Each structure stands twice: as C-alpha cells, then as structure tokens.
Amino acid sequence: MIFNETAIQGVYIIDLDLRKDDRGFFARTFCAREFEEHGLKPVVAQCNMSFNYKKGTLRGMHFQIPPATETKLVRCTQGAIYDVIVDLREDSPTYLKHVGVELTAENRRALYVPEMFAHGYQTLTDDAEVVYQVTEFYTPGYERGLRYSDSKLGIDWPLPTSVISEKDANWPLLND
C-alpha cells in the first residue's frame, strides 16, 4: 500500500501497490502492521457496504461521539464517488477543515478517516457501491451528523443532490 498524507494530520489517501503479471494484478488492501507503522488504528469491528442507484446521491455527514468514536477505511468498489471528511477535533489546527477525494472502482483508492471526523460522499455515477471497514460498532445513541450544505463547512459538492435521506438533509447547522 502507498500511504499519501493529506493537509490534515492523520488523514491518508491510500493507493494500492499493484503486483502485475499476465494474469492481472494482486494488491494488499489492508495490513494491520503497515497501518500501525503509520500511526493508524488497525482494528476492524465491522465491514459495511452501501449501494446507490442514482448519480448525485448524497450520504452524510456522519460521525459517532465518545465512547463510540469510529475510524473508517472507505473504498468505492463500483462506479465513483466524491468522498469528504471534516475535522471535528476541537483542539486541531485544522478544526472544521475538510478533505475531499474522488474514489473510483478504477483508481482503487481508499480514504482513511480518523476518529472525530464527519464523513459523507456523493455518487458520481449510477450504481455506485462503497465498502467501509470500521473500528467501532454502530451505536445509534452516539450517532451525530452535520448538514452537508452548511456554508460554514464550505464543501463544494460536484453535482446537484438527486437523492438524500430526510435525516441527512436535516442534520443541524453548526450555528444552530
């Protein structure tokens, strides 16, 4: 794996190190030792998958608060998404800053999402599928969210929103 640091400490875009031959390629998508060597949390408690019928579908911005904070490794396995995370660590110099990256089945990239980051994405294609490795079990009482369109976040989503859940459309604004 190739760990690419971003402008926000602890956030990595992870590319595969492909071993190619006449058959195709082989690549490691996760290795606890390599994650630990980069100071990342290598625990996996759950693996989740979402499938999205329509281009422009928006999911997010989700996070869990202590004691159920989550770290995620997110990968698009079919189609393409624009994946965004927002730093919610109040003591961080990048508090409320975000990183956005295009994850596609073709580029095979993954985004490492540390604890206390809101996470969301918008589908760039119909029939987009996303796989998440998560370090904590889903705990509804600790789930929170941010409004995807909050001007204070300054996220420039690439497409108009075609589908969004009522819950995601109505998360509170930061000034509320």
Image (cartoon, rainbow, N blue to C red):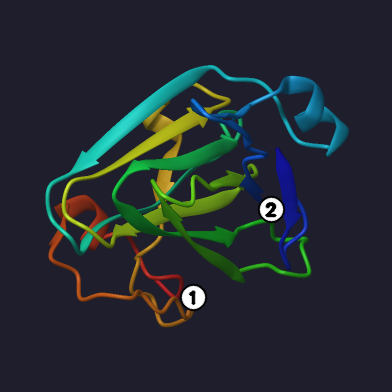
- Can you name the residue that lies furthest to the front here? 22
Please identify the quarter of the rendering in which residue 48 is found.
top left
Residue that mark 2 sits on: 11
Residues at badges 1 and 2 in contact (C-beta under 8 Å)?
A: no
> Looking at the picture, how far across and down is residue 139, in whole percent?
42, 26
The Cα atoms of the two marked residues, 1 and 2, are separated by 17 Å
> What residue do we see at 73% from left, 21% from top?
32
> Looking at the picture, how far across and down is residue 63, in whole percent?
48, 45
Q: Is residue 27 left or right of residue 175?
A: right
> Looking at the picture, how far across and down is residue 96, in whole percent?
60, 69
Amino acid at dot 2? Val
Q: Is residue 39 above or below residue 99?
A: above
Of the image marks 1 and 2, the number of the one nearer the N terminus: 2
> What residue do we see at 54% from left, 24% from top?
136
Quarter the C terminus occupies: bottom left
Amino acid at dot 1? Leu
Residue 153 circle label? 1
Please identify the quarter of the rendering in which residue 66 is found.
top right
Q: Is residue 15 above or below residue 139?
A: below
